[in-house]
Image (tube, rainbow, N blue to C red):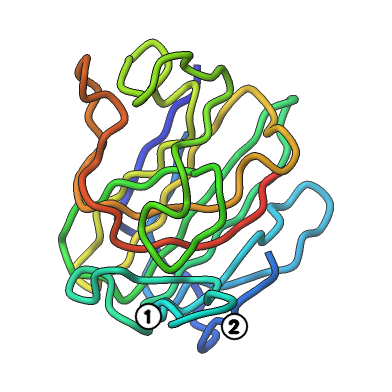
Amino acid sequence: MRHFVAVLAGAMVMTGGLAACSSGSSASGAGTPTATASSGTSAAVLASAAFAAPAASGKQPAGVTYNTGLVPTGAQAIIKAKVEDGGREITLAVSGLRPNRTYGSHVHAKACGAKPADSGPHYQDKKDPVQPWADPAYANKNNEVWLDFTTNAKGEATMTSHVKWAFRKGQANSVVIHANRTSTEPGMAGMAGDRLACLTAPFS
């Protein structure tokens, strides 16, 4: 059983701005999320970026915000992942968001684009044969990667999710931040409101 807990306390080391990369329990910390190199069994940084407005054309920023009121330009995020017992541990750390606010967040199938819908649906280990995906038998925290979080008074949060499976190569490519906490009710399962921002991150 995968479990995840968001704890809005602790401290992370501030190391300045984050540059865009190519690409359960948790504790939120103060300060800017810190990107660290992978070593041994430590988590690897898949992506780190400051959110920017979508590009008018061509290549998009690694981090795109579609709602600057809730995810301001310059807000920052890091996504880390590591292998554990054949599964995966995924961590999302954010800063610069609205304080004391709950957001939904999930791993999505496609890379971020100029439009919110460009990142495609949630990544699912076992795909729901019916679309749109709102069946709790498939849209749940064990079959998808849910990273809902609540920011602290400084607009910071860290969330970690654990799953007991590996991503299919090339089929999970971003993390999307949504406006609301993720629903678990039939017909609404997996839904979390508007897509506010997206960070491209190729999972494997």
Which mark is nearer the camera, 1 or 2? Answer: 1
Q: Residue at x 50, y 22 (%)?
A: 143
Q: Please give the residue where the numbered disc 1 appears in the rendered image.
A: 53
Disc 1/disc 2 C-alpha distance (Å)? 15 Å
**Image spot of residue 13 (x, y percent):** 51, 76
Q: Nearer the viewer, residue 152 or 127?
A: 127
Can you name the residue that lies furthest to the top here?
137
In the rendered image, the vertical position of residue 196 relative to residue 144, given as above or below: below
Can you name the residue that lies furthest to the front here?
57
Q: Nearer the viewer, residue 80 or 201?
A: 201
Can you name the residue that lies furthest to the right here?
40
Q: Residue at x 29, y 46 (%)?
A: 104
For residue 68, side relative to residue 55 (left or right): left
Q: Quadrant of residue 44?
A: bottom right
Name the residue type under label 1: Ala
**Image spot of residue 2 (x, y percent):** 49, 23
Q: Residue at x 26, y 34 (%)?
A: 191
In the rendered image, the vertical position of residue 59 relative to residue 83, given as above or below: below
Q: Nearer the viewer, residue 173 or 83?
A: 173
Q: Please give the residue where the numbered disc 2 appears in the rendered image.
A: 19
